[in-house]
Amino acid sequence: MAKKGQRRDEILQALARMLESNTEGRVTTAALADEVGVSEAALYRHFGSKGQMFEALVEFIEESLFSRVNRILESEEAPDDQCEQILRLWLGFAAKNPGLARLMLGESVQGESDALKTRVNQLMERLETQLKQLLKQARVQSRLSADTDALAGANLLVAVVHGRINQYSRSNFRNDPTEQWPAQWAIIQAGLFQ
């Protein structure tokens, strides 16, 4: 018999797999229970609601990404290099975790609670806040192009990440979001930084 923490992880892994294969974006608890091989009641022994299951996945994404973002920020590299590494991290994470990519886009929470949608949106907002700080730092270091607005630049970078992940999802995970990234970053870098 699986331990409580182990069963909880199995449920979350099954949910992530289902999000990858479910193009309609909706996963029912009955289908999830069937995928895990337990009753729906067993799901609710580990999570109080389906929303809590999604919340746990969002927390996993945040912990996975922002722990690495913090390591990037602790490095002594220039702000433009840090921006590139952070964006590449997000794109690489999406490439390795297709079901979670759909969750990051908000596709998987259509029809779910507004609170859950807000929580998912906070992922990209948190990324944008981090990028704004880096671009402001680049401005102080005279590394940001003179005519670049830090807020607009950060928003553009998030839109690029979101768009690349969206293309990946729309291609049913055939078009790797990291493909052509070095060339794309070179274009972005030339426009934003000195």
Image (cartoon, helix red, strand yellow):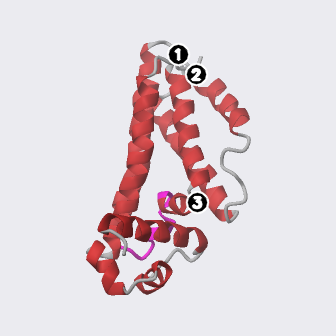
Q: Residue at x 53, y 18 (%)?
A: 146
Residue denoted by label 3: 98
The boundaries of the magenta stretch are: 104-113
Q: Label 1: how many residues lie within 10 Å, few (<14), some (14-19) or many (20+)?
A: some
Q: Is residue 105 magenta?
A: yes
Mark 3–mark 1 Cα distance, whole angstroms, equals 35 Å
The relative height of residue 24 versus residue 126 in the rendered view (above or below) is below
| Type of amino acid at the residue the image marks with label 1 | Arg
User: Is label 2 in contact with label 1 (beta carbons under 8 Å)?
Assistant: yes
Q: Residue at x 46, y 82 (%)?
A: 37
Which residue sits furthest top?
Answer: 142
The answer to whether residue 75 is seen in the rendering is yes
- Quadrant the C terminus occupies: top right
Q: Secondary structure at mark 2?
A: loop
- The residue nearer to you, when weighing 51 against 30, is 30
Q: Secondary structure at mark 3?
A: helix
Q: Position of residue 184 (x, y in %)?
A: 69, 36
Q: Position of residue 57 (x, y in %)?
A: 40, 60
Q: Is residue 29 left or right of residue 90?
A: left
Q: Position of residue 162 (x, y in %)?
A: 55, 51
- The residue nearer to you, when weighing 97 against 34, is 34
Residue 143 numbered mark, or none? 1
